[in-house]
Amino acid sequence: MTNATTREAKVTRARWIRRPEGSNWGDFGPGDALGRMNLLTPQRVRAAVAEVREGITHALSLPLTLPGGNGLNPNRFPPVLRPTRRFGEINFNYELRHKVEGATDVLCDDLAVLHLQYSTQWDSFAHAGALFDADGDEVAEPVFYNGFRAGEDVVGPSHLDDSGFGGLHERTTSSGGALGIDNLARTGAQGRGVLIDLRRHLGEERTIVGYDTLAEIMAADGVEVEEGDLVCLHTGFAQRLVEMGGDPDPDVLHGACAALDGRDERLLRWITDTGLSALIADNYAVENLPARPADPPAPALPLHHHCLFKLGVHLGELWHLTPLADDLHRLARSRFLLTA
């Protein structure tokens, strides 16, 4: 994945006249849809591969069934598995001899219904846009990273009766277009992961982490973040979900583990200045929610706004980082090869 192969949506007109202050819109091209994943050049991938020494591997995904229930977010539900149909009958433990004389086959075929942000996830750039005057006409319109437009590039139904809730086999009704996470999935993300172990320093009580605390922890552990790095924040939150075994206590979880202070301007500037390619955490939203109050107009999710909308920095949420963090601590390391 290189600057030379940056994926760009077809540009038929200028997407914006004004870009948000502090954003990088247009820096990777007028139709860029990859954001700072463009920084994962072949040179940086080779440097990441050089981090492999012990050959230890960790899967960083939770099971799709965790956290369990919908106490963390009432809009997101666990996956549903159901059988398909064969010859109009239930296609699970189906004895084919009912239709094919003498057949000994017993067949299972099923389908899955997934809420894509229920468990371990990437946030795409279509996840959080903003009302912003990109046209320079003093009228704010709903736009996303690099000026992609709501209703034009990022499309979905406008009425509940057209939103697909009536059944499992209706047509697809929404698309992130060029900003959908499927665009990242075409090549994946591979680069140098850098882990910052907040849990080891702060414990598992809810702590709102600003730039000063983050910098102190990095200095204490000798952690350095360079351009193109995939930064992982270990808080212990996902490990708590594993230990709760699919029956989470929302009252406990909403007050557990560290989260970034999205209102801390110095923290946001650090994200900008380091040139990190992605910001990943094992907690629910990377940033603390609800955020500290701010004078309106202002985003309710300031770190999402800064990363997804302004910079084209993907956020990773609910990654399972504790086993990796334990091994890195044992080896006195903070860097590793990350493939997602």
Image (cartoon, rainbow, N blue to C red):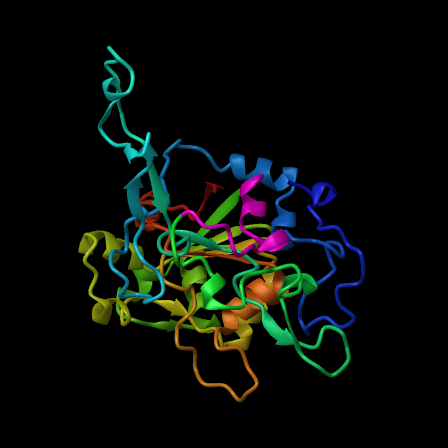
Of all residues shown, which one is farthest toward the bottom?
295
Magenta span: 169-189
Q: Position of residue 73 (x, y in %)?
A: 33, 66
Q: Is residue 175 magenta?
A: yes
Q: Nearer the viewer, residue 284 or 96?
A: 96
Q: Nearer the viewer, residue 47 or 206?
A: 206
Q: Is residue 191 left or right of residue 153?
A: left
Residue 183 versus residue 275 in the image, above or below = above
Residue 174 versus residue 101 in the image, above or below = below
Residue at image x 80%, y 56%? 12
Q: Position of residue 144 (x, y in %)?
A: 62, 65
Q: Quadrant of residue 154?
A: bottom right
Q: Is residue 207 left or right of residue 276?
A: left
Q: Is residue 182 left or right of residue 219?
A: right
Q: Quadrant of residue 107?
A: top left
Q: Quadrant of the N terminus?
A: top right
Q: Quadrant of residue 115?
A: bottom left
Q: Nearer the viewer, residue 109 or 222?
A: 109
